[in-house]
Amino acid sequence: MKQLTRAFVAVFVVSFALLFWIKELNASEGYSGDKTISVYNWGDYIDEELVAKFEEETGYKVIYSTFDSNEAMITKINQGGTNYDVVVPSEYAIQKMVEDDLLQAIDHSLIPNLQYIDDRFLDLSFDPGNKYSIPYFWGTVGIVYNTKLLEDRTFNSWNDLWAEDLENEILLVDGAREVMGMGLNSLGYSLNSRDDSQLIEAKEKLDTLTPNIKAIVGDEIKMLLANEEASIGVVWSGDAADIMWQNENLDYVVPSEGSNLWFDNFVIPKDATNVEGAHAFINFMLDPENAAQNADYVGYSTPNIGAFEYMDEEVITDERFYPSPELTAKLEVYDNLGKVMLARYSELFLEFKMHRK
């Protein structure tokens, strides 16, 4: 019994010493307490040079990790024990996180660079008064198409995709809201419709698009379009910009009926351990020069009008990625439709995918 007790004590002492050593090591490297900021973001969605610049200017150490979907991010935060200080969810996820009491209010007085954000992108339905979030990037959902393969054909309407001579030419992004939204918009309905008869009508119209669909895919849609494996894709504007840079034969358009206007915003989780550092990081990223550098690296549209001074005129006047206020007024932000209605969208989208088989 004494030997067992001694063994237990020895294990306890070693474990405590090891934990103390790790704590001291982390402290020496800046991985503890008020010196550390934990950032949780989408993959390849920040210029790492800016992270290094922030660390050098402020003395903070940034622990950076990534997620690949809003759902995965919310699940991880809901599980607890993560202690992220800054997270970058999309608009409908922000609304859900507020409802689930996962976020804390942001102190605007600690973010003076908020003054550079375009008023069009503030005080939106998913976060009135921007109480819980600060805009990071924004964009649209639209049609990217190959002008060489299609002999300079243009697309001004979602309904142009239903042309009979486009058999097996279209790639769709694998997203229920995006694809169902396309169907709803093509009929003149809101992409946030809760009317089941409209949803069924949209799904049935999508079924008739089946002959023209080559595949419904995820991230590989960019590679396939850039390599001209298909001539048309329904994609997010940031992905369109990326593949257009790789292949000059590609163009992008937001259809005249309207589409989705999406946002990815900074938020501070309720269990953040360095709230002061989180505000400092957000304010740093909103500095116009930093925002310009970040937009140039990421390739998505910045809501920071102060950054325009440091960006190429050709970029900020390109209405494919910085659409006019007139077109922007036709775009809709995804509402958080609730679990039941979101499940209905997913159910109909799955039926549509199965119909293709």
Image (spheres, rainbow, N blue to C red):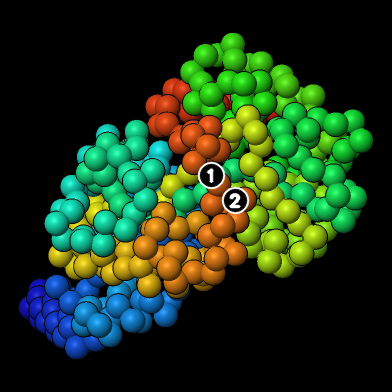
Q: Position of residue 236 (x, y in %)?
A: 59, 49
**Quadrant housing the C terminus:** top right
Report crowding for label 1: few under 14, some 14 to 19, many 20 or more residues within 10 A (C-alpha). Answer: few
Residue 107: x, y in percent? 15, 53
Q: Earlier in the sequence, mark 2 or mark 1?
A: 2
What residue is shown with label 2?
A: 319
SS at mark 1 in the image: loop
Residue 306 at x, y percent in the picture: 37, 63
**In which quarter of the view is residue 355 placed?**
top right
Residue at x-position 19% and y-position 88%: 28
Instruction: List x then y, in percent, for residue 300.
Output: 52, 59
Distance between the alpha carbons at the discs numbered 2 and 1: 6 Å
Residue 94 figure quarter? top left
Look at 81% across and 53% down and name the residue there. Answer: 146
Q: Is residue 53 left or right of residue 214?
A: left
Q: Identify residue for label 1.
A: 324
Q: Amino acid at mark 1?
A: Ser
Q: Is residue 202 above or below residue 303?
A: above
The secondary structure type at the circle numbered 2 is loop
| Vertical relation: 313 (above or below) 10 | above
Identity of the residue drawn at 79% across and 43% down: 154
**Marks 2 and 1: CB-CB under 8 Å?**
yes
Q: Looking at the image, is 195 positioned above or below residue 185?
A: above
Which of 236/29 is in front?
A: 236
Crowding near the residue tagged with mark 2, few <14, some 14–19, many ≥20 C-alpha atoms within 10 Å? some
Residue 249 relative to residue 141: left or right: right
